[in-house]
Image (cartoon, grey):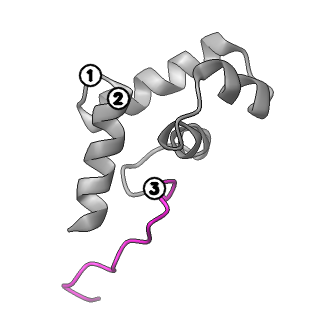
Amino acid sequence: ISIHPAIPSEDVSNNTFDFTPRQQEVFAMMSKGASNKRIALDMGLSESTVKIHVRAILNTLQVSNRTEAVLKAKQYLDT
């Protein structure tokens, strides 16, 4: 076991923040600027379901909006 963390990839869809697999997919699209509607269409989900995933992501990251979520992930990956 290494005491040094592995260098995270630039892909923010990894499970760094203990997201479920579906939340990882939503977060990856969200981080590319996709709207809830676009995410829902692309993933075959209802927009309400996407909103539930987005809220869970925001809660996990302890932020209040999508921009803060992406910035927090970027800050983490840059460390």
On the image, the x and y values in percent for residue 43 come to 75, 33
Q: Residue at x 31, y 54 (%)?
A: 74
The residue where tag 3 is placed is: 12
Measured along the vertical axis of the image, is residue 8 above or below residue 34?
below
Secondary structure category for the residue under label 1 = loop
The residue where tag 2 is placed is: 58
Nearest the eye: 21 or 1: 21
Whether residues under marks 2 and 1 lie with C-beta atoms below 8 angstroms apart, the answer is yes
Q: Residue at x 33, y 80 (%)?
A: 6
Measured along the vertical axis of the image, is residue 1 above or below residue 38?
below
The residue where tag 1 is placed is: 64
Is label 2 or label 3 in front?
Answer: 3
Marking on residue 53: none
Position of residue 46 in the picture relative to residue 54 (left or right): right
- Does the stretch in magenta take in 27? no
Q: Where on the picture, by quarter, is residue 71?
A: top left
Nearest the eye: 38 or 27: 38
Q: CA distance from mark 2 to mark 1?
A: 6 Å
Q: Amino acid at mark 3?
A: Val
On the image, the x and y values in percent for residue 48 come to 62, 10
Q: Quadrant of the N terminus?
A: bottom left
Check the image and name the residue furthest to the top.
Answer: 48
Counting residues from the start of the chain, the first of labels 2 and 1 encountered is: 2
Q: Amino acid at mark 1?
A: Ser
Q: CA distance from mark 2 to mark 3?
A: 14 Å
On the image, the x and y values in percent for residue 64 come to 26, 22
Question: Which range of residues does the magenta coloring cover?
Answer: 1-14
